[in-house]
Image (cartoon, rainbow, N blue to C red):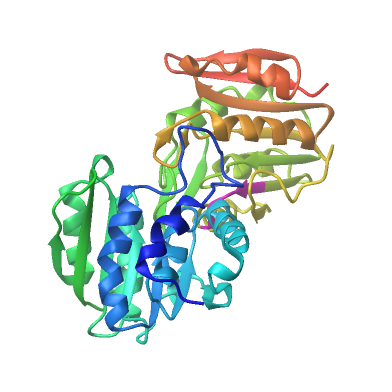
Amino acid sequence: MTLTPDDLDAVLGALRRRPDVESPELRAWDAADRYLLDTAAPWLADRPAAVAIVDDTHGALTLGALAVGAGGVRVHHDSLVAQRALAANAEAAGETVDTAAIEQRPLDEVMTPDAPLALLRLPRSLDRLDAVARLLAARAGPDAVLIAGNMLKHMTPTQNDVLRASWQQVDVSLARGKARLLTARGPRRLAALAPARGYDPDHELHIVALPGVFAAASLDIGTRALLDAADQLPAFSTAIDLACGSGVLAAFLARRSPGAHVIASDVSAVAVQSAALTAAANGVSVEAVHDDGLSRQPDASADLIVLNPPFHVGAAVHTGVALRLFAEAGRVLRPGGQLWSVWNSHLAYAPALERAVGPTRQAARTAKFTVTVSRRR
């Protein structure tokens, strides 16, 4: 059944973050979600119809839009964790929400002319924003409206300019609850962005990255520190580049051991697609897997895992994701297998690695990063 706007607080209050990191200081929705929904509510009530939603973090926008009158919701998530969080929250909502009205779609199919409204959590990556805004505009009807929002600390005036490239008019809201909205009208028809391409001469690696991938088509300094220490890597028959990003480490491993089975795994769809493109650019074979951690990999199945873990949970600096990935590596490594990790030295992950995997030693250290080797017990 369809809820009234008065029920919105109850819908949001029932949301959980699972399978994402859960802790007392992290919530499944924020003031930007509520601002987006409050702004959309009267518009949807007047014209109940399908709404397109992109990068809803845990289901607040999707379930909230249904609560305030959307006839259906077409959703795209780059993050598999976000997609699974929505599914879990929709199931928990039971008869409160018509889950049959939720449809997952690829990014280039989420917006259609019969969906007059799109809601977007503004990404911090300007390239990702440009790519999303272009695809939504290219498939929108002439009267479509895009409402994008985030917390003020993650917004810049440059985002307005990026939106104006593919939408004729962009209006900026007043701030509310430390959040702000951008409302775009008048879609333009622009070509989709091509992947970025780069080359690292020090390691002779081609890098291909779709918009929004961490570090784009270059080597971030953490990955570079790990590659610089890679002459110490052991022999392997199965190796995994966990949280692979553009897949440059996976390509390096596949080139190092051409007969090995190399897996590139990431929670981000654009990262997985980029890893496949990076492997092709380097002429190597890599299995690119869209996964939450290593949930699709069996226990004790890998000889080597390399990891440059994120230190953010969404927008918050938090160790939760890294700790989950350490635990996953400990499960998937064979006894005696090795986890090579690179991390900001101030995070002091060595004790956590000892607990999750096994004996841990320092392989290299730079001014900012530490590379460690953990041996599976």
| Screen quadrant of the C terminus | top right
Asked whether residue 123 is in view, the answer is yes
Q: Which residues are magenta?
A: 264-269
Out of 301 and 53, give the one closest to the viewer: 53
The quarter of the picture where residue 89 lies is bottom right
Q: Is residue 356 above or below residue 162?
A: above
Q: In front: 315, or 60?
A: 60
Query: Would you place residue 182 above or below residue 297 in this image?
Result: below
Q: Is residue 231 left or right of residue 366?
A: right
**Residue 99 at x, y percent in the picture:** 57, 72
Quadrant location of residue 376? top right
Say if 224 sits above or below 373 in the image: below
Q: Position of residue 197 (x, y in %)?
A: 41, 53
Specify whether 249 is left or right of 30: right
Q: Position of residue 295 (x, y in %)?
A: 72, 48
Residue visible at 65% across and 26% down? 340
Q: Position of residue 254 (x, y in %)?
A: 68, 44
Could you say which is closer to the camera, residue 162 or residue 104?
104
The residue drawn where x is 58% and y is 31% is 322
Residue at 57%, 15% (x, y): give it.
364
Residue 67 appears left or right of 262: left
Q: How many marks?
A: 0
The answer to if 266 sits in the magenta stretch is: yes
Which residue does the image show at 57% across and 62% down from the upper left? 93
Q: Is residue 122 visible in this depiction of the protein?
A: no
Q: Nearer the viewer, residue 21 or 192?
A: 21
- Is residue 222 covered in magenta? no
